[in-house]
């Protein structure tokens, strides 16, 4: 009875539409965390184009990310899940293990589109028993931004490894005019874990060891903690998070920060609501953008080059009209793909590079997409091919703790509790040493399993 009531309710919500000259006899519901008004409008246009092509109507339902888990669980209990849900990596494995996502539908879509056209990293992170839990659609990789105009006169090396990063931070540190490196330190912010995890990955620190068990009490973790504390020594005091680091970099007060590619919009100087101080000081719009270098993959002394990546996925649920849902996902990753990426091109990298016939089709198309708010510009024209290559280079190798090792559900708990930034802050404040911090992280994360 609950299922019948839920289905009737959904049908009442779906507007009557027509497709290819006749009444559409199939309708699906699409939940999306791309909830901003302008992005919802883009998704509605995609849904309208899809309906005209297939006769399948799509109801686009925006859901704020901080409410997504609650709504999904309520819908799952009522057996009234949406047909498709666009969501971040953090939830994918946990939902698959809970029986919310239909793995076989994702496998069919990937096989039809050809898994070889996708980046390996985004697929590896959602490996599940029987295939992949969902279909990757876009992503961004964390970047280290640095002031090339400050590096050049001092002949500093590109900060793509720990020694170069620390050396440059020390050489450029002139507080309060310029901070050598602005690190994330706020214990209440996920951003702090994202930045720290990037450096931990670069030093070979993984959430689990070779035996599949959580193992963070390691020499590599101790070394990473000590390195991060050194970086924090070149940062302002207090609890710093993404707002501070972005503001200080755009104000010219930070020589290096770690941020997502979403900063490309503000950094460009094209936004009237976001002043870029080095541009204004020189009366030279675009100065800071042209003098910013980008490092995607960082190397630590005990690990290979690594980059923290966040990926968005299209999950087909167990309550879906599977045939219609699979067609919608395939459309979004083919004919509708560049329109989807264009919603926020600076932070939506193509995790599907192209097709079997044209392997670089979507990478090539992405380079020509525009970004900006008050003024628009093509990414490749504004930042140049070198920057574009640097930003997109790491897509194949995006990495995260625990994903692909059967610990996706645990990672969701780690991020939800913010245990990593809390212990990290305790260490940075000098209340425990690096060995105690590694031991505490190991113990507390094991307790979450």
Image: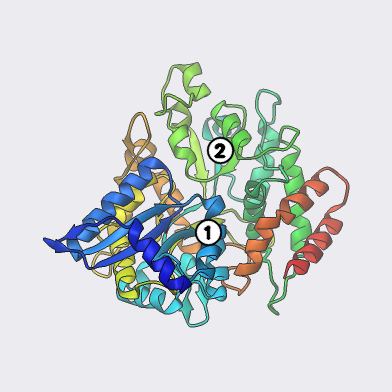
Q: Secondary structure at mark 1?
A: helix
Tell me which residue sits at (39%, 38%) in the image: 383
Q: Secondary structure at mark 2?
A: strand
Q: Is residue 157 visible in the rendered structure shown here?
A: no
Q: Is residue 117 left or right of residue 188?
A: left
Label 2 packing within 10 angstroms: few (<14), some (14-19), many (20+): many
Task: Name the front one of labels 1 and 2.
Answer: 1
Q: Which residue is mark 2?
A: 146
| Nearer to us in this view, 36 or 288 | 36
Of callouts 1 and 2, which one flags the residue occurring earlier in the amino acid sequence?
1
Q: Which quadrant of the view contains residue 380?
A: top left
Q: Is 303 placed left or right of 85 in the picture?
A: right
Q: Nearer the viewer, residue 380 or 414?
A: 414
C-beta proximity under 8 Å, tags 1 and 2:
no
- Give the percent coordinates (x, y) of residue 165: 65, 44
Apparent side of residue 96 relative to residue 109 in the rendered image (left or right)? right
Question: Which numbered circle lies on residue 441?
Answer: none
* Mark 1: few/some/many CA within 10 Å (<14, 14-19, 20+): some
Q: CA distance from mark 1 to mark 2?
A: 40 Å
Disc 1 target residue? 71
Viewer can see residue 78? yes
Would you place residue 154 above or below residue 304 in this image? above
Expressed as whole percent of the image width and height from the top left, the position of residue 232 reads: 73, 41
**x 83%, y 54%: residue:** 434
The picture places residue 275, in percent across and down from the top left corner, at 49, 24
Left or right: where 100 falls relative to 418:
left
Residue sticking out furthest to the bottom:
130
């Amino acid at each position: 009875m609950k299922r019948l009531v839920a289905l009737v309710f959904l049908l009442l919500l779906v507007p009557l539409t027509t497709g290819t000259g006749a009444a559409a006899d199939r309708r699906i519901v699409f939940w999306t965390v791309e909830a901003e008004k302008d992005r919802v409008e883009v998704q509605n246009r995609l849904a309208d184009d899809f309906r005209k092509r297939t006769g399948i109507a799509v109801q686009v339902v925006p859901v704020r990310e901080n409410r997504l888990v609650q709504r999904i669980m309520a819908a799952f209990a009522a057996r009234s899940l949406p047909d498709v849900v666009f969501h971040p990596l953090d939830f994918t494995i946990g939902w698959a293990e809970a029986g919310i996502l239909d793995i076989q539908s994702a496998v069919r879509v990937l096989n039809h589109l050809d898994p070889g056209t996708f980046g390996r990293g985004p697929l590896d992170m959602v490996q599940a028993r029987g295939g992949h839990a969902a279909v990757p659609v876009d992503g961004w990789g964390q970047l280290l931004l640095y002031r090339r105009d400050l590096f050049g006169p001092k002949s500093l090396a590109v900060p793509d490894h720990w020694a170069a990063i620390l050396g440059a931070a020390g050489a450029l540190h002139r507080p309060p005019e310029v901070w050598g490196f602005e690190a994330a330190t706020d214990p209440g912010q996920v951003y702090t874990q994202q930045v720290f995890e990037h450096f931990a990955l670069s030093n070979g620190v993984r959430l689990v060891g070779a035996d599949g068990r959580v193992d963070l009490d390691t020499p590599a973790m101790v070394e990473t903690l000590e390195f991060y504390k050194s970086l924090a020594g070149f940062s302002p005091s207090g609890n710093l998070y993404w707002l501070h680091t972005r503001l200080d970099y755009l104000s010219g007060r930070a020589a290096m920060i770690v941020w997502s590619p979403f900063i490309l919009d503000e950094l460009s100087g094209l936004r009237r609501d976001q002043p870029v101080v080095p541009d204004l000081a020189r009366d030279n719009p675009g100065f800071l953008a042209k003098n910013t270098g980008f490092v995607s993959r960082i190397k630590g002394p005990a690990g290979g080059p690594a980059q923290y990546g966040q990926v968005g996925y299209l999950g087909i649920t167990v309550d879906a009209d599977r045939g219609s849902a699979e067609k919608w996902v395939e459309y979004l990753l083919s004919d509708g793909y560049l329109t989807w990426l264009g919603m926020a091109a600076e932070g939506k990298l193509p995790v599907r590079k192209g097709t079997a016939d044209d392997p670089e089709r979507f990478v090539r198309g992405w380079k020509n997409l525009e970004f900006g708010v008050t003024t628009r510009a093509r990414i490749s024209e504004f930042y140049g091919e070198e920057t574009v290559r640097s930003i997109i280079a790491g897509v194949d190798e995006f990495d995260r703790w625990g994903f692909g090792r059967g610990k996706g559900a645990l990672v969701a708990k780690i991020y939800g509790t913010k245990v990593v930034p809390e212990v990290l802050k305790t260490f940075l404040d000098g209340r425990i040493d690096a060995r105690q911090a590694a031991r505490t992280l190991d113990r507390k994360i094991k307790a979450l399993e």
